[in-house]
């Protein structure tokens, strides 16, 4: 393990990055495309509904993510599983200000978390739009999605000690640039 880490450090020193695939999924209008544009280009753009898969490169430390925004309409959600076998991390985006759709979002998240194709893939749950007055707290979302038995914590615990998939929630605001950096660093730790 030490030797592998040392080799990665040497490659990183010379500018080489490890490639990783990141899947960005969630219900429609949760902010997946806005997240991708904000992180990749620094732009805050209101996007039309995603009709085709969008892909961008994101550099974070020693990782170069190829991030796929698949869209979130019901007919598109059926193809999410097609991407699972080749993915290194999943970012599930929830609109924290749209409590009426929590049950629908929970059902989709549950299907991701119980999928046997990706049992070791870390999942960061972005509670987007926390800057809105109708947004729920992190505690309320964790309770509504019954994530207490699933969450592993924001601290970096080695996978060997966890013994299960890494899952954590991150309150975010793309408008105010809050939370998503922490979520990406958390994911990067479990992917490296």
Image: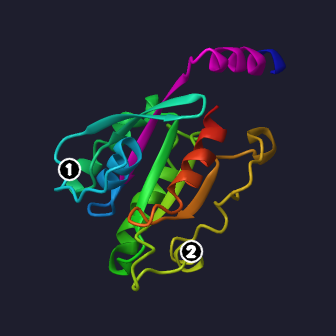
* Neighbourhood count class around disc 1 (C-alpha, 10 Å): few under 14, some 14–19, many 20 upward: some
Specify whether 120 is left or right of 106: right
Q: In this view, does 121 lie above or below 75?
A: above
Specify whether 184 is left or right of 101: right
Residue at image location 16% in from the left, 47% down from the top? 51
Look at mark 1 in the image and give the residue it sits on.
50
> Where are the magenta residues, as a range?
4-25
Residue at image location 29% in from the left, 44% down from the top? 70
* Neighbourhood count class around disc 2 (C-alpha, 10 Å): few under 14, some 14–19, many 20 upward: some
Specify whether 121 is left or right of 96: right
Numbered disc 2: secondary structure? helix
Numbered disc 1: secondary structure? loop
Sequence-wise, the earlier of marks 2 and 1 is 1
Residue at image location 45% in from the left, 74% down from the top? 130
Q: In this view, does 131 lie above or below 9?
A: below
Q: Position of residue 43 (x, y in %)?
A: 31, 51
Q: Is residue 84 above or below residue 39?
A: above
The color scheme shown is: rainbow
Q: Where is residue 153 in the image (x, y as percent from the top left)?
A: 70, 59
Residue at image location 71% in from the left, 20% down from the top? 9
Q: In this view, does 5 lie above or below 23?
A: above
Disc marking residue 127: none
Q: Was residue 129 drawn as part of the magenta stretch in this picture? A: no
Look at mark 2 in the image and give the residue it sits on.
138
Asked which quadrant contains residue 13, the reply is top right
Tell me whether circle 2 and circle 1 mark residues in contact (CB < 8 Å). no
């Amino acid at each position: 393990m030490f030797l592998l880490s040392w080799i990665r450090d040497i490659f990183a020193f010379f500018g080489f990055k490890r490639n990783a695939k990141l899947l960005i999924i969630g219900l429609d209008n949760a902010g997946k495309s806005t997240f991708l544009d904000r992180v990749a280009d620094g732009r805050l753009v209101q996007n039309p509904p995603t009709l085709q898969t969008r892909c961008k490169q994101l550099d974070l430390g020693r990782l170069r993510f190829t991030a796929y925004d698949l869209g979130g309409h019901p007919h598109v959600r059926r193809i999410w599983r097609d991407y699972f076998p080749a993915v290194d991390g999943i970012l599930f985006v929830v609109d924290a200000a749209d409590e009426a759709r929590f049950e629908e979002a929970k059902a989709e998240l549950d299907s991701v978390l119980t999928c046997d194709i990706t049992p070791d893939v870390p999942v960061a749950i972005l509670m987007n739009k926390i800057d809105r007055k109708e947004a729920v707290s992190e505690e309320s979302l964790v309770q509504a999605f019954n994530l207490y038995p699933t969450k592993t914590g924001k601290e970096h615990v080695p996978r060997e000690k966890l013994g299960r998939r890494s899952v954590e929630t991150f309150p975010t605001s793309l408008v105010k640039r809050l939370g998503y950096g922490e979520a990406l660093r958390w994911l990067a730790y479990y992917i490296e």
